[in-house]
Amino acid sequence: MSKIAFFCIPAHGHTNPTLAVVQELVRHGNEVWYYSYDSMKEKIESAGARFISCDKYDMQMQLSPADGVKISTDLAFATKVLVETTLAVGKGIEAQMRAWKPDCIVADSMAVWGKAIARKLGCPFVSSTTTFAFNKASAKTMKQSPKAIFQLLFSMGKINRDVKRLRENGYPIRNVLDIIQNDNETDTIVYTSPEFQPCAETFSEKYLFVGPSIREGDKMRKKVQDAGEGQKRTEEQAAGTQNRKARTGERKQVYISLGTVNNDKCGFYQNCIAALQDMPVDVVISVGEMLELEKLGWIPENIRVERYVNQIEVLQNTDVFLTHCGMNSVSEALYFQVPLVLFPQTAEQQSVAARVYELGAGVYLKETDAAAVRNAVAAVLEEPVYREKAGEIAESFYRCGGAEAAAEKIERAAKG
């Protein structure tokens, strides 16, 4: 049995893929402590880990909405938040970690304080990467240059002064890239397949591509986990389509979601309703908690608007998914062979959308008016090649080792 600590940011798309891994580690008899935020407590504890709140340490919990926008546009300010969070978390838990003596620390690639603490303690470290793995080759493919992203970090004295504070507090950090960027010597779990990952061949054997870690509602992997690889792939593929086969002759279903963060888009949802109200389809729209539902106006009978849905269950009966292109949502959709209408909102989501488009499993929503929405949805519904390409990506996911392989990699790191 090993002692394993997890660190993550307060985001469902970064937390959810780790939960099945935690379950596997606990099932193997390991003790898992999970440092996260109160909004994630219930799901983390349900996975079997001991939840430890980081809310009181995190500068981000005290930011205004304007500050949240500033993080994405002002690298100096983002660095300050990163450093303040690392120092606060480290100060708050260092004594506890030294007393507990974890055998391995696993941290989300954005929870850089986890990596910094592991370095300070000299503890084996595994990066949990819920987006695409990032290096110079993949950055070029995704039209993002590391130099362009980080050039300001090296040109601004206040950024270097913040990083210096980490060194002064015992963290062996040379610069911001030292904690943000993983290299080919860092054990890294990536929750996608080599086929979906851009430039997968440029990453070392330290990187393990385990495929999407599908959470609640996924009966397929549990059903076939002891089967041989060929049989496993066949059964998973069959299970992934059985619900839609049962729907033959019924109306198609369209699912629309912009994720859990940037989803207060009343005008966009109104356009979707106008676009699809007269189509022979059933529509599920997940709008989150910020939107005032009464502002949407009249809702036709073929459209259901919910604040939240069980996305896994919905996707198993969906024929087209209009998505913001978060990595977690796209992976879940492709796992169930659902083609996509791509509506990315951030640079990270743009890179995911570009890969889906490149592999032929979706189309871009280039405009947001009702006619554009209707045309994009109709195109994906009417052209079978999009579902075929989604199925090819799904097969690459099924060939990966999943949560079991991720847990085994962490256990090997813990045992040295």
Image (cartoon, rainbow, N blue to C red):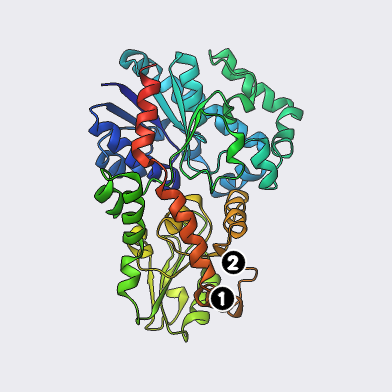
Find numbered disc 1 in the image and state the secondary structure of the residue it sits on: helix
User: Residue at point 63% right, 27% down?
Assistant: 177
Residue occupied by mark 2: 363
Q: Are marks 1 and 2 in contact (CB under 8 Å)?
A: yes
* Residue 51, placed above or below residue 274: above
Residue 237 placement: quadrant = bottom left
- Which kind of residue does numbered mark 2 sit on? Val
Q: Return the residue nearer the eye: 42 or 219.
A: 219
User: Residue at point 49% right, 45% down?
Assistant: 193
Q: x and y percent of residue 185 in the render? A: 55, 23
| Screen quadrant of the C terminus | top left
Q: Is residue 244 visible?
A: yes
Answer with left or right where residue 78 lies relative to residue 8. Answer: right
- Which kind of residue does numbered mark 1 sit on? Ala
User: Residue at point 44% right, 55% down?
Assistant: 394
Q: Residues within 10 Å of mark 1 (few under 14, many from 20)?
A: some
Q: Residues within 10 Å of mark 2 (few under 14, many from 20)?
A: many
Q: Is residue 74 visible?
A: no
Q: x and y percent of residue 69 in the render? A: 60, 48
Q: x and y percent of residue 342 in the render? A: 56, 63
Find numbered disc 2 in the image and state the secondary structure of the residue it sits on: strand
Residue occupied by mark 1: 379
Sequence-wise, the earlier of marks 1 and 2 is 2
Answer with left or right where residue 297 lies relative to residue 365. Answer: left
| Screen quadrant of the N terminus | top left
Q: How many marks?
A: 2
